[in-house]
Amino acid sequence: MSVLVCFHAHPDDEVFGTGGVMRQAADAGHRVVVVTATDGALGEVPEGLLAAGETLAERRRRELEESTRVLGAHRVVQLHYADSGMAGTPENANPEAFCNVDVEDAAARLAEILVEESADVVTVYDRNGGYGHPDHVQVHRVGVRAAELAGVSHVYESTLNRDHLRALIAANPEWSADAQPPELDTLGLPASEITTVVDVSEVMAAKRAAMLAHATQVGDFGPFLQMPDEQLRAAFGQEWFRRHGAPDGLAETGLPL
């Protein structure tokens, strides 16, 4: 049995880039651990969704528990750093926000979990955090350093295939301009920098169910949940990674589990 640790910024982030590999790893008998840096307390939420006295952080914790259950995780850990908010917002200046915490201190906390779990593979985000979110960028920094401290050699940067998304949009003219990813030229990585492509189409039912678990994040997931299965599979039936420190030309079809 191998151990896969997926390090994410907020509850719901686990679904997009690593939901499929998590479910596949669990189905193959491996241990899956999810660690989130923040509670996502600054996320948007549909009006009237929260119960009286319920905080967004509390609801997102329960959503995370349900999502990770569907995806086969054996353990979920929240580090409880403050949510930094989207790039350019006033919350970025909060000294307690995850984007501003000392990388060495945060990495030491994550490294303790990696050592405790005897992690074989760690996933983080690419150097730009996928799309520039301050918490996602910090996940890259902290996760890479934690792996160094814990002696984990297999570090995979979850990303988006920019060229695939561009082709997908071009092939689906019915998708409105409003539905296109923002700043596509800087979203994820070009195909030439991606080392690892994992086909997760066989577990798309679980991935869709995990999306549904995050009811507070309907703004993120709603447009995708309305897609027919074929389109959803085309958009999310592959998960892309850059193996940290990999040699040029590496082409993998799975994580080393």
Image (cartoon, rainbow, N blue to C red):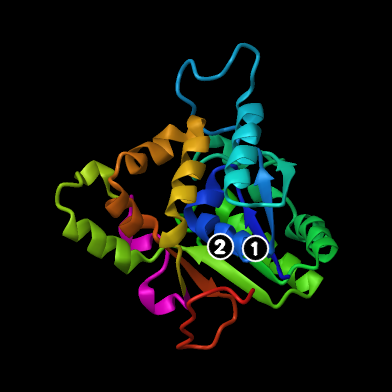
Q: Nearer the viewer, residue 11 or 106?
A: 11
Circles 1 and 2: CB distance less than 8 Å? no
Check the image and report above or below for 115 versus 13.
below
Q: Secondary structure at mark 2?
A: helix
- In the rendered image, is residue 10 in sight? no
Q: Magenta stretch containing residue 187, yes or no?
A: yes
Taking 112 as reference, is 45 left or right? left
Residue 104 location (% of width, % of height): 78, 61
Q: Secondary structure at mark 1?
A: helix
Residue 15 location (% of width, % of height): 51, 50
- In the rendered image, is residue 34 in sight? yes
Residue 159 location (% of width, % of height): 47, 63
Q: Which residue is mark 2?
A: 24
The N terminus appears in which quarter of the rendering? Answer: bottom right
Q: Residues within 10 Å of mark 1 (few under 14, many from 20)?
A: many
Amino acid type assigned to the residue bearing label 1 in the image: Arg
Residue drawn where x is 47% and y is 52% of the image: 16
Locate residue 238: give its quadrant: bottom left
Q: Which residue is mark 1?
A: 141
Residue span colored magenta: 181-196
